[in-house]
């Protein structure tokens, strides 16, 4: 990833997605809390979203978000959906953790504070997706299912799809109890390195980055087209928000992607 130190709002970009023409994308930072985990959107949050939009180069009204509930629900976004969740909670797509579109002028965004934000792009068929993969969504295979939707519904070729696995809690800090560990052990124990050793309390560390990467490989995405940020949100306190570090006081950063129309540019 590369960091863009914009004076209004520093953000990151994936190098592999930056190479795709007609695509705008970003991963925001702790320079501003753009989420609303509790209560109604605050003026500060709305200002932060507008600053981010100016820094990256899109209209804030183009944002489109889902009501993230750690599901594997995927929604196709139309151009007329632009603005859903941009400045309020009520208009978000209900109970949705992945958004996909072939329409220009719509900026798909997911929010995170340890969960894995993943951006997908097919520069050939001009289809993009934004995925929120918490541990439940990862276990349910949400990114694999989103890539499959891109292939089945939009005729994307897996070998053309680029993916960016964003900053999120790393294996270094993602320790889970036995009730969660056993779920991952049942599904992923045959893959070395994904699960750390189980301690005397039945807890272990889990590599969500690698699990999601393997899901992308499983649907045919080329290894060289998958970029992993490798930045742990709990460790990098100056750059990203983290629920495990800050609890209920944690803000939210976002990962977004957008197809540019003929009259739009970065």
Image (tube, rainbow, N blue to C red):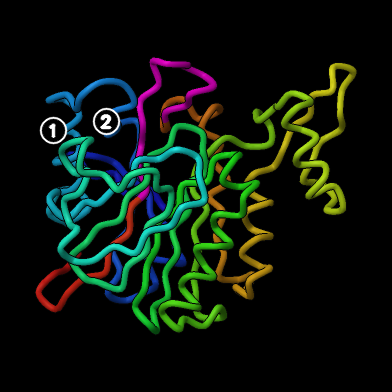
Element type at mark 1:
helix
* Vertical relation: 137 (above or below) 226: above
- Judge the density around disc 2: few (<14), some (14-19), many (≥20) Cα neighbours within 10 Å: many
- Front position in the image: 15 or 259: 259
Region of the chain picked out in magenta, as a range: 241-255
Which element carries disc 2, helix, strand or loop?
loop
Dot placed on the residue nearer the N-terminal end, 1 or 2 = 2
**Residue 67, magenta (yes or no):** no
Residue 249 magenta: yes
Whether residue 72 is visible here, answered yes or no, is yes
Residue furthest to the front: 94
Pick the residue in front: 90 or 258: 90
- Name the mark on residue 94: none
Task: Point out which mark residue 47 bears.
Answer: 1
Kindly identify the residue that appears in the image at 30 percent across and 48 percent down.
Answer: 93
User: For the residue carrying disc 1, how many other residues have a C-alpha within 10 Å: few (<14), some (14-19), or many (20+)?
Assistant: some
Tell me the residue at 42%/16% (across/down).
248
- State the quadrant of the C terminus: bottom left
**170 on left or right of 90:** right
Q: Is residue 136 left or right of residue 163?
A: right
> Quadrant location of residue 226?
bottom right
- Name the residue located 54 percent from the left edge and 57 percent from the top edge: 143
* Residue farthest along the right direction in this orientation: 200
Disc 1 + disc 2, Cβ < 8 Å: yes
Residue 183 lies, in percent from the top left, at: 76, 39
Whole-percent x, y for residue 228 in the image: 57, 54
Number of the label disc, if any, that sits on residue 32: 2
> On the image, which quarter does residue 258 sit in?
bottom left
| Separation of residues labelled 1 and 2 (CA atoms) | 9 Å
């Amino acid at each position: 990833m590369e960091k863009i130190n914009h004076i209004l709002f520093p953000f990151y970009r994936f190098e592999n997605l930056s190479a795709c023409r007609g695509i705008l994308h970003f991963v925001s930072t702790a320079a501003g809390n753009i989420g609303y985990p509790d209560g109604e959107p605050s003026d500060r949050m709305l200002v932060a979203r507008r600053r981010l939009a100016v820094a990256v180069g899109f209209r804030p009204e183009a944002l489109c978000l889902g009501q993230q509930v750690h599901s594997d629900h995927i929604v196709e976004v139309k151009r007329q959906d632009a603005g859903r969740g941009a400045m309020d909670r009520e208009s978000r797509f209900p109970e949705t953790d992945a958004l996909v579109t072939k329409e220009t002028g719509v900026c798909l965004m997911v929010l995170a504070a340890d969960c894995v934000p993943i951006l997908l792009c097919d520069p050939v068929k001009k289809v993009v997706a934004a995925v929120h993969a918490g541990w439940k969504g990862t276990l349910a295979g949400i990114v694999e299912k989103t890539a499959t939707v891109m292939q089945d519904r939009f005729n994307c070729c897996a070998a053309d799809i680029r993916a960016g696995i964003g900053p999120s809690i790393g294996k270094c800090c993602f320790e889970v109890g036995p009730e969660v560990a056993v779920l991952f052990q049942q599904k992923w124990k045959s893959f070395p390195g994904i699960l750390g050793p189980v301690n005397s309390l039945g807890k272990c560390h889990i590599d969500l980055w690698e699990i999601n990467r393997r899901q992308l490989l499983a649907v045919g995405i080329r290894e060289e087209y998958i970029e992993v940020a490798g930045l742990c949100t709990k460790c990098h306190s100056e750059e990203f928000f983290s629920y495990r570090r800050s609890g209920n006081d944690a803000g939210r950063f976002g990962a977004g992607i957008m197809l540019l129309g003929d009259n739009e540019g970065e």
